[in-house]
Image (cartoon, helix red, strand yellow):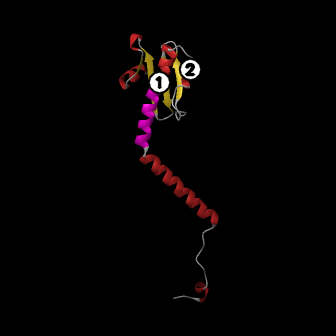
Amino acid sequence: MATKESAGQQPPRWSPSRKGGIVLLAIAALILLAAAWSWPSIQGYARVGTAYSAHIVCSCRYIGGRDMESCATDLEDGMGMITLSEDTEKQRIYASVPFVEQAIAEKRGDYGCVVLNDTEVEALE
């Protein structure tokens, strides 16, 4: 039963700042959902990209005799997330996408540069 006091009251309205916060939260949730859904693809591309980079830079550096900066220019466009480092003593190149994937290539005599498999990488640690 409506009383005189309750009949004239309007339902509370959402403020613009609260609506904006909910919209931002919904967008963030959609981004996280998309990232989770495509995580296997991201890992796959990172695995291939790091192995490719390690092999190409290892060959350039230890077979071609060029410096790291010059060798990094041999990589394809769009590989900017891959970081490269080297161990000159062991003639190894480390390529990684931070927090996702890492690959190591080393020069092995007449075989040239070889990308290490998971068992070989674990033996290094």
At a point 37% along the width and 24% down the height, the residue shown is 117
Looking at the picture, does residue 40 appear above or below residue 63?
Answer: below
Q: In the current view of this chain or complex, which residue is farthest to the left? A: 119
Looking at the magenta stretch, what is its main secondary structure?
Answer: helix
Q: Position of residue 59 (x, y in %)?
A: 47, 18
Looking at the picture, does residue 4 appear above or below residue 100?
Answer: below
Q: Position of residue 103 (x, y in %)?
A: 44, 26
Q: Residues within 10 Å of mark 2 (few under 14, many from 20)?
A: some
| Residue sitting nearer the eye, 21 or 83 | 83
Q: In the current view of this chain or complex, which residue is farthest to the top? A: 109
| Residue sitting nearer the eye, 106 or 61 | 61
Magenta segment includes 49:
yes
Q: Amino acid at mark 2?
A: Met
Q: Position of residue 47 (x, y in %)?
A: 43, 32
Which structural element holds mark 1? helix
Which structural element holds mark 2? helix
Q: Quadrant of the C terminus?
A: top left
At a point 45% along the width and 22% down the height, the residue shown is 55
Looking at the picture, does residue 124 appear above or below residue 78?
Answer: above
The residue that label 1 is drawn on is: 54
Mark 2 or mark 1, earlier in chain = 1
Q: Position of residue 14 (x, y in %)?
A: 60, 69
Residue 109's disc number: none
Please state the extent of the stretch shown in magenta in the rendering: 39-54
Q: Amino acid at mark 1?
A: Ala
Q: Are marks 2 and 1 in contact (CB under 8 Å)?
A: no
The residue that label 2 is drawn on is: 68
How much space separates mark 2 and mark 1, taking CA atoms? 11 Å
Left or right of 2, for residue 105: left
